[in-house]
Image: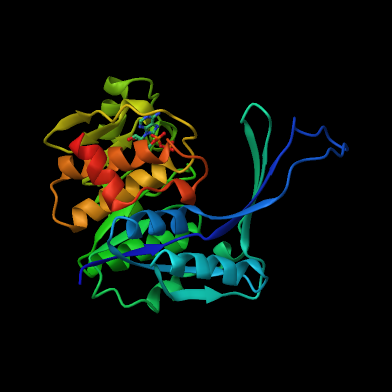
Amino acid sequence: MPYILVIGSLNADLVVRTPRFPAPGETISGGDLAIIPGGKGANQAVAVARQGTSVAMVGRVGSDSFGPTLIQNLQNNKVDTNLVQISDSATGTAIIVVDSSGQNSIVLSPGANDKVTPADVDAVYFQDANMLLLQLEIPLETVIHAASVARQNGLRVILNPAPARSLPDSLLADVDILVPNESELKLLSGQSVTDIDSAASAARTVLAKGVKTVIVTLGSNGALLVTDERIAHIPTFSVDVVDTTAAGDAFIGGLAAALLKGKALEEAVRYGNASGALAATKFGAQPSLPTQDEVEQLLRR
Ligand code: ADP
């Protein structure tokens, strides 16, 4: 059966709502702590699995109590966790404070995600997989190695360059589809990205570094598909927006699952838009990731 590999991060998101952010040295009272499974790698693996597609996660959790919770959560979502290892360290966590206006302030502690090494990649059997999804919440040398090995084994490589950072051209040359948002594209191209024309121009600059296809996610403006041959703007769906957290992860899940099912690029971007739009209608990250039925229903509308 065709399947997707995700090599990336698993985090426990520790979320507390407060009336306002505390000042330095100040203690304030907040609401009850919510512990929510997160991390871009795990979110994208769940996004793919909810589209009815086989997916295996490669990554690390820590030897604390969060580790088994995150692994169990992936299993509950039908993600294969045989390649998730337990490191002798803390699990990756994001400490998130949300104020009454919905603004958030986040401290990320990479923990075990920082221990995902090129040797972990070498332990993976790539031959049976069809596609690799990568993000940038594990060490860059591991991402570079994974893209290279996947390319050698004939997998399609999709890189979501988040959180934003500059990348070596050697990595970009191993990427089939790069999926940045506007700020990530700005950083990678060194050009300002303010509208569709400037996004197209910046995407062309990144294509020149060796990426085959760039798909820029544009929030409520949908996505821009840019290859050497063409530029296509694909609008998203109009929805009642509640919280756009994980819209990008949902987009990648919808896109990757559709490509694996043999859809053409432009059609797969429509699946991505539908998934991203649906994720924006619900609160939170993983709880908002849509199912295959929900996406197909929106696409028919
Ligand atoms: P990120 O969350 O990574 O910054 P975007 O904000 O670009 O990514 O969102 C990813 C995708 O989710 C968009 O390309 C779009 O398809 C969908 N999306 C995001 N926000 C909205 C919105 N307000 N309305 C409809 N679709 C949205």
Task: Pinpoint residue 249: horizontal percent, then vertical percent.
Answer: 40, 47
Q: How many marks?
A: 0
User: Which quadrant is the C terminus positioned in?
Assistant: top left
User: Would you say residue 116 is visible in this rendering?
Assistant: no
User: Which quadrant is the N terminus positioned in?
Assistant: bottom left
Q: Residue at x 48, y 68 (%)?
A: 59
Horizontal arrangement in the rendering, residue 55 relative to residue 301 (left or right):
right
Q: Residue at x 48, y 50 (%)?
A: 287
Report the image quarter containing ligand 1: top left
State the residue in front, 100 or 273: 100
Which picture quadrant has residue 266? Answer: top left
User: Would you say residue 199 is visible in this rendering?
Assistant: yes
Horizontal arrangement in the rendering, residue 290 relative to residue 225 (left or right):
right
Which picture quadrant has residue 247? Answer: top left
Horizontal arrangement in the rendering, residue 34 relative to residue 297 (left or right):
right
Which picture quadrant has residue 224? Answer: top left
Task: Pinpoint residue 216: horizontal percent, then vertical percent.
Answer: 31, 35
Horizontal arrangement in the rendering, residue 284 relative to residue 190 (left or right):
right
State the residue in front, 211 or 127: 127
Q: Residue at x 87, y 39 (%)?
A: 27
Task: Pinpoint residue 66: horizontal percent, then vertical percent.
Answer: 63, 66
As drawn, 147 above or below 30: below
Task: Pinpoint residue 159: horizontal percent, then vertical percent.
Answer: 35, 51
As drawn, 146 above or below 227: below
